[in-house]
Image (spheres, coloured by chain):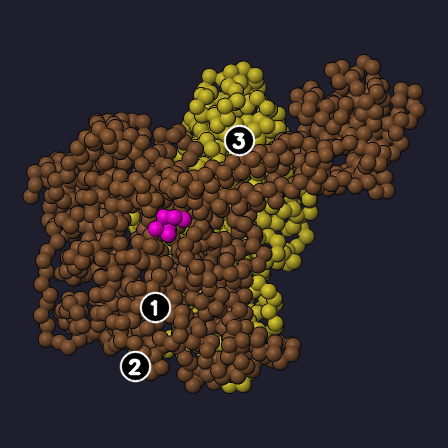
Amino acid sequence: MHDNTLNHSRGFINRRQLLQTAGGGIGSWALSHLFNTDQLQAEEISGPLTSKSPHHKASAKSVIFIFAYGGPSQVDMFDYKPALAKWHGKSIPVFEKSDAFNKTTKDTAMMSPYKFSRHGKAGLFFSELIPEIASCADDICLMNSLHCESNNHAPALFQMNTGFILAGRPSMGSWISYGLGSENASLPSFVVMWDHRGGPIGGAQNWTSGFLPAAYQGTPLRSVGQPIIDLQADRPLRPGQQELRLRMLQRLNQQFVDSNPLEKELAARIDSYELAYKMQFAAPDVVDLSRETRETKALYGLNRPISSYFGKQCLLARRMVEKGVRFVQIYSGGADQQLSWDAHSGLQNNLDQHCPEVDRPIAGLLKDLKRRGMLEDTLVIFGGEFGRMPTNQGTIGRDHNPRGFTMLLAGGGVKGGMTYGATDDFGYAAQKDPVSINDFHATCLHLLGMDHEHLTFHHRSRDMRLTDVGGAVIHDIIS
Amino acid sequence: MNTQLLRLFALLGYVWPFLCQTASGQQQDTHWAFQPLRNVGVPHLEADWPENPIDSFILQKLNTAQLQPAKRATANQLTNRLYLDMLGVLPTSDPLFPLDDNVLATPWSQLVDQVLASPYYGERWGRHWLDLARYADSNGFEFDFVRPFAWRYRDYVISAFNRDMPYDQFIKEQLAGDEINRSSLQSWVATGFCRNGPTVGNQTLDKNRYEELHDVITATTEVFLGLTVGCARCHDHKFDPISQKDYYSMLAIFHTSEKRDQFIGTTEQRQRYDELRKRKKALEQRVRSATTEPQAGQWKLQQGILTQSSMVNNTRVWFGDATWTNYTFEVDFKRDRVTQQPFSFDAGVYISVLAADYRNGYTLQLGASDDREHALHYEINNSRHSLLPRVSGKLENDRWYNLRVEVGEDDTKVWLEDQLIFKFDDNRHSSGGIALGNWSTSTQWRNLRVTNKQGIPLLNAFPSLEKMTRPANTDGFDIEAVKQQIEQIDNQIATLPLAQAITDNSPIAKPTHVHIRGEYNNLGEHVEPAIPASVSNMVVEFPEPAKEARTTGRRLILANWIAHKNNPLTARVMVNRIWQFHFGRGLVETSSNFGLLGFEPTHPGLLDWLANEFIRSDWSIKHIHKLILESATYRQSSQRTDSHASDPDAALLSRFPMRRHDAEVIRDRILQASGSINLRMGGPGIFPYINEEIIGSGTTRKWPQVSQENTKHWRRSIYIFSRRSVPFPLLEGFDAPVTTSSCSRRITTTVPTQALQLLNSRFTNNQSMEMARLLIREHGENRRILIKHAYLRVLGRFPNTREIELGLEFLIEAENLHDSNATEKLLFSLQDLCHVLINLNEFVFMQ
């Protein structure tokens, strides 16, 4: 997937123009091999982000991971448990005090205040909270049996992102960038966007490249203003000033390369400036929504105040994947834990706020990807670091639940219109076909054409993996 | 071969017979790194090239590979290489710069002595050690709390390198300083090595503790011994002769140790410490009460609109008449905003009726619980007691709401926007006026009407502010200012003699067991402390400590074994590290793994020869530096020619390997070139500017906002506060390691985001401007001279004629872009040139 539109975008000066506009004797300088072609294809770029072949035929090329930070309530959204109505207010036998994060959490069931109904040909259950997502049921696989190893936000976030509950390991996006490289060298391969209320707990530790080279870390992308930090000069430059600087830079660099022709790193660094220059136009271009139709914007909910911010991020995600970005992560919910999906009290207020923020945008994303033929090779994931308890915390809220929760998957070779795995009658713990985080990661890597046991990086005398020593691919969800 | 070792092999052989033979075909019992150091003779070669024995070893190997050493680098290249490699900055005072390309201004060995005597040496080479020691100034993990005294360990390392502390002593102090000298602050500080790892939280205390001990064991064995013991936590090591039992025997050495912030200072300092802590406590109390007690806030009454805008917590005014009993009270209010991080459940608009004063009454809290519900409290002295269950509801910002309260004889009813939200029957408060206020919000009120039962107005408008009562004490109380005071006290405390240390709290050792599968609560057989037996044939005993002992003494025994001259690993591992930091790769490429999976040395003889030299020189690191720096090997040109094809990575040293500078060198050199650099040494970490949005990427702020950097931010990068959740972008971008675990060798990447940082960041643009100003100030306005000095400042060399011509053309072209007077045009165009120079390959690569 190459970006051939760049040269036509506003303000872009290609290499030939760069040479032509140079005044005096400067223009006659032969710059470098870089200036010999009008277009720089990603494959020509050597370096850590070179596009690499997968281990096996991939069904997915890119991933959009929508992270509902705080822990969305699966029993109120996806995992329909009629038993909770019968048991409402009564102690449920599966509850274990040690699972609860909060000491006040009770063992008494709390039925969902929301109505569930069947959707799509396969009749997947969704609650009334997310009618738009429900309308995409036939493209969705509900993985209802995830479980993780911590009942607290930070470790659970780290585990969902890096496979380990302790901080500092490379994140999934970094591993994937490492394994596959980038398809568009003028954009970062792994992009992170976070909620307007703030980022998730642990900050950059959630998108770190850990012991992998820094080239693979997540790049924060802002949905307002300058999309990438340091993309443009801190203070505005005069017209032509940057080009002049770059021309001189590349000229002097070339001189240095000429006296050290065999040092590949020197040429690679010249390339990196070329790419940085291109990124300055490619990144604003990708966040420029002016060429999106009103209908598309409405599809993502940009026309409604409640969903406009998140909708824009989803639309940006599509645009980035379209341009070859490998892994896009969007956080919904952030900053103070009460502003996230962490509904310890006021369950309904929380869900009534967050679900409409994301419902239309996510559905819009799925529909838009599908009609553009992109859903088949884009894996869309929606879920949080854990789920919520089917019991009442005492404040009409639900506590953290690491033992059973739901991840929504769509596209990228995942079977639509199916549920995989199940929790017990109460939605408390994964019971049928439980899926560990290692399994989940192994499956994602598999869809991307990678064998999780062979995607390794030698560090501290071990071949490290995203899945450590575990993980099994869930073949049943793969179409 | 000792019996222990045989026993171990028997054991290993029993478990995994196939593992006695390794991939390299080498027997474990003959693994080179576990053999005692050999007394290696220096090869005799008929050649003029060697300057010292190092060269003989290198040349021998080159000859075998049919390679020639490269020609000597130019005098200028050599000077720069020496300074950047050893100090990370160029000469700070005048011209050490050779004027002739081939003649040094000062004899080489004298130059070597000069750099080795420079205090900046410790700042450069101490940084390498900090990578190994996974040093950081905060805990990491969820809350990433600050470690206020961690910087003392950093300074200890810098000073140890500068003083050329014997390496054996350096080892012992870091592992057991508290057992060596209990009255020396430095000894305690040194044990910070065992505290540098990330703190683990959110699990049971025991589980956390074993994670931390695992970090200590892993770091100790990797850093000092080049052994990866960590894998043996859950099972016997698959490749190295380290059993699970070895791991837990090692754990037994550290098991009794605990974290302690140790105070070692004078009585006066102690008093100061106590006094500062007392002051801090008082200020904290003030902040606490400011956030829980009513404040006057900033009230205004204009054109009938009453406004409170201070956003501090719980601000109240009271008015009306204590004798009112039955009345109807109506008011419109509008909330403008809520502070970003409210005391979430307290935030809201507060309205009291039947109130005796601003502290006592029935109080409505509208927009409570993060704006999810409305509450009604029965309030005594601002202490709130719930009267009725909260009701769902929220307030929109910037919208006027109407509130009506009917205080009747039987009950009181509250309507919000004509919706009855509360009805209560309670007569504990009998007297009352009205109180208005808010918490973490800013609110306006208007259209106040109070009427009695008969419909006669009691109040038709707000009384003047003077007639309202409110807390007298702290009008305009500025929480942020107090928080800053607290921070200043923290800064003062951080400079007191406190060590972030470990020690055993008792001489009685905590019993240690094997943890089955590494699980903290799954105990297997009991183990005694022991060193990993298979790597050395030394006999090490761990006797019971003496009765009067304060600690178990076990760590010191371990440290003495590691730092013993007969330990086959220690000296080899360290000289190899020194070699690696000089040449970019070690003689053993896997510098933290000398085990069976590690690489074999490219020059085994040289490695042992250097290790022997190291021990013979009383473990002098500077002695090894001097040997390396004075070698012809080090002084080769970095230029790669076709004849180097058979030595592509310069592993055989057929040239000096060119490589990119470390992140810190790049930043420090920019500051030095611009003249901004502040070479003050030591002390608590600094917080240079980081883009606002990066600071905001977590849930809470972890970095102060800096509107403009000044000289206190322009210190060397080793002093930048190392906050685990907010890696400093410029350093992170240029491959500074994450501090989760020991980093033995940095990876170098080349990516466009680095180019963006150097091209566009505020830092490089400001510093290139500083540099342009400085150049004009010092050298006038002659462009040719300015270009010469710009090159000198940035690249440590003068430009050639062609570069001067190019520079002149560039300056003129750049001036044409800038639309101002001649002086400014020159300044701006010169800034453009300086900016180009600090982006050059030549600037970021070591030749």
Q: Is residue A315 above or below residue B800?
A: above
**Residue A74 image label:** 3
**Residue B83 image label:** 1
Span shown in magenta: B151-156
Which quadrant of the figure contains the C terminus of chain B? Answer: bottom left
Q: Nearer the viewer, residue B483 or A415?
A: B483
Q: Work out how far the residue at label 1 is from the one at label 2, CA to CA, in angstroms.
A: 17 Å
* Residue B765: % across, % down: 54, 66
The answer to whether B274 appears left or right of A300 in the picture is left
Residue at 36% over, 62% down: B120
Which chain is rendered yellow in the image? A
Residue at 35% over, 82% down: B99
**Residue B427 image label:** none
* Residue A388: % across, % down: 52, 29
Q: Which mark's residue is nearer the viewer, 3 or 1?
A: 1
Q: Could you tell me if the residues under marks 3 and 1 are in contact, i.e. CB atoms within 8 Å?
A: no
Q: Is residue B169 above or below residue B529?
A: below
Q: Nearer the viewer, residue A178 or A397?
A: A397
